[in-house]
Image (tube, rainbow, N blue to C red):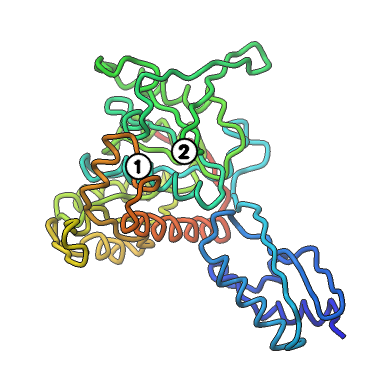
Amino acid sequence: MMTEQAVLAALSNVQEPDLGQDLVTLNMVKDLAIDGNRVSFTVVLTTPACPMKDMINKACVTAVQLLVDKAAEVTVNFTANTSSQRMKGDKVLPGVKNIIAVVSGKGGVGKSTVSANLALALAEGGAKVGLMDADIYGPSVPIMFGVRGQRPMMKDGGDGKGLIVPLDKYGIKLMSIGLLVDDKNAVVWRGPMASSAIKQFITDVDWGELDYLVIDMPPGTGDIHLTMVQTVPITGVIVVTTPQEVALADAKKGIAMFGQAQIKVPIIGLVENMSWFTPAELPDNQYFIFGKDGGKRLAEEYDIPFLGQIPLVQTIREGGDRGIPAMVSDDAITQKAFRRFAGSTIRSIAMRNANLPVTEVVTMVE
């Protein structure tokens, strides 16, 4: 007869792929039940969007059948408790488990496209996701999500203070300065005004409970970046670049900024956008217009995780212009690339949360 002790001993041979320990040691096995040769249990994942779910399921079934009873009928259920290194009692975004800033050293590398489709890929896996457009001078979210002209509602925050209710589109919460001002008008603000707006997006928006808040940062390394790290405890940064040398040179500056001793925000990884061009009529062809593997080499040089490569495909641009991002289009090739990138990102976040100190607000900067 199967026993709980025997099943747990078998499952102690199943490793969590990213955290490097077995499921039992990590206390990820719950609700173990045995009825004759039938056994069921729940594995608590580090995120609902876990890309390794199928592999863990197969490993659990194999372990029980191989080490306990080859005739065992094994049912593995999954739930998730998204890993987080937020400090308990945080007053800033208390319901948000992970705050991810997407940055680039220069404009034009597809940072907003990457941010939007990362958020959608995370939500597709079952995570609760928000997307904050922090690019005050060049907001892209309203166009990319087809919400131009829509205005967010207000609600009572309970203390007499009004809160902005973010828009909900494709299952994620959206906030952008482009939802508050006429898109025909330029935002002509000095740095302090832009920084003040960013603070309001953090403190005066009802983000609620989220597994991930993705922040689409403006290009460069300026006031808004400093305001962000001083206002909110950022879990980590994703750097976007193209393979082109001029983009790589600016990406290095972004990496250097967040690696400074006064700031010290972890780099979750680097993603290379526009890695190659594939024409629709020749789906198996790759043309390396901006160079080849520049982002991969940069990640190796700085010893940071390489999160993947996104091809340059015409439908990505067309979908963004029409308010239908790649992840909610019928472009299977592009979706595959973004899902792979999102999976690598999730794994890197889980490892960051397991191995690095609690996230804190940066207290430097003059």
Pointer 1 or 2: first along the chain: 2
Is the Cβ of the residue at disc 1 closer than 8 Å to that at disc 2? yes
Q: How many marks?
A: 2
Q: Residue at x 40, y 26 (%)?
A: 176
User: Where does residue 280 sit, x and y in percent of width and height?
Assistant: 19, 56
Instruction: Indicate which disc residue 190 carries.
Output: none
Q: Residues within 10 Å of mark 2 (few under 14, many from 20)?
A: some
Note whether residue 264 is visible: no
Identify the element where label 1 is drawn: loop
User: Where does residue 13 sit, x and y in percent of width and height?
Assistant: 66, 81
Q: Nearer the viewer, residue 317 or 56?
A: 317
As drawn, 297 above or below 139? below
Q: Nearer the viewer, residue 261 or 235?
A: 235
As drawn, 43 above or below 124? below
Cα–Cα gap, marks 1 and 2:
10 Å
Mark 2, residue position: 170
Q: From the viewer's perspective, tell me whether residue 354 is left or right of residue 36.
A: left
Mark 1, residue position: 325
Q: Residue at x 84, y 76 (%)?
A: 4
Q: Residue at x 29, y 34 (%)?
A: 322
Amino acid marked by disc 2: Tyr
Note whether residue 95 is visible: yes
User: Where does residue 208 sit, x and y in percent of width and height?
Assistant: 60, 32
